Amino acid sequence: MTDPVGTMLAADRASRALGIELLELSAGRATARMTITGSMVNGHGMAHGAFVFAVADTAFACACNSHGPVTVAAGADITFVAPVREGDELVADAVERTRFGRNGIYDVTVRCGTDIVAEFRGRSRTVATA
């Protein structure tokens, strides 16, 4: 049997370019890590929200593809709770809340150390079977 998440990440040039690493993976769960670099900082000296979203989105993608069929984002929302700065290491923990038919709902908490910096909710759609 092939590893669907490994195959997906091997082809994910965006996550690789951002330095996102998959730390843990199990059915419906994933943890990813990324360090904020100088090129990710906006004019206010904080990480641009798109990069916080990116690490959450990668954890979400790994969690929803952990079941095998090709699954993509149907939509996502993020709430930024605290600012992130250059050098901060972000860890995104994705957890499946429910799957129904070809759909799923996943929550991702993004932390810097023990502090929550963002909460993300992703909605998935399976587009192919394994």
Image (tube, rainbow, N blue to C red):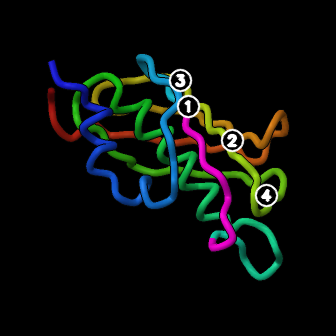
- Quarter of the view holding residue 85: bottom right
Q: Earlier in the sequence, mark 4 or mark 2?
A: 4
Which mark, by number, is residue 31? 1
For the point 29% across and 44% down, the residue is: 10
Residue that badge 3 annotates: 97
Disc 4 + disc 2, Cβ < 8 Å: no
**In the image, residue 64 lies at what x, y percent?**
39, 32
Q: Neighbour class for label 2 at 10 Å: few (<14), some, many (≥20)?
A: many
Q: Nearer the viewer, residue 71 or 99?
A: 71
The residues tagged by marks 4 and 3 sit, at their Cα atoms, a distance apart of 27 Å
Three-letter residue code for mark 3:
Arg
Residue that badge 2 annotates: 110
Q: Residue 7: say if magenta.
A: no
Residue that badge 4 annotates: 84
Disc 1 vs disc 3: which is toward the camera?
A: 1
Which mark, by number, is residue 129? none
Disc 3 vs disc 2: which is toward the camera?
A: 2
For the point 66% across and 64% down, the residue is: 37
Left or right for 103, reference 68? right
**In the image, residue 102 lies at what x, y percent?**
28, 31
Q: Earlier in the sequence, mark 1 or mark 3?
A: 1
Three-letter residue code for mark 1:
Thr
For the point 79% across and 57% down, the residue is: 84
For the point 63% across and 73% down, the residue is: 39
**In the image, residue 11 lies at what x, y percent?**
26, 50
Disc 4 + disc 3, Cβ < 8 Å: no
Q: Residue 38: say if magenta.
A: yes
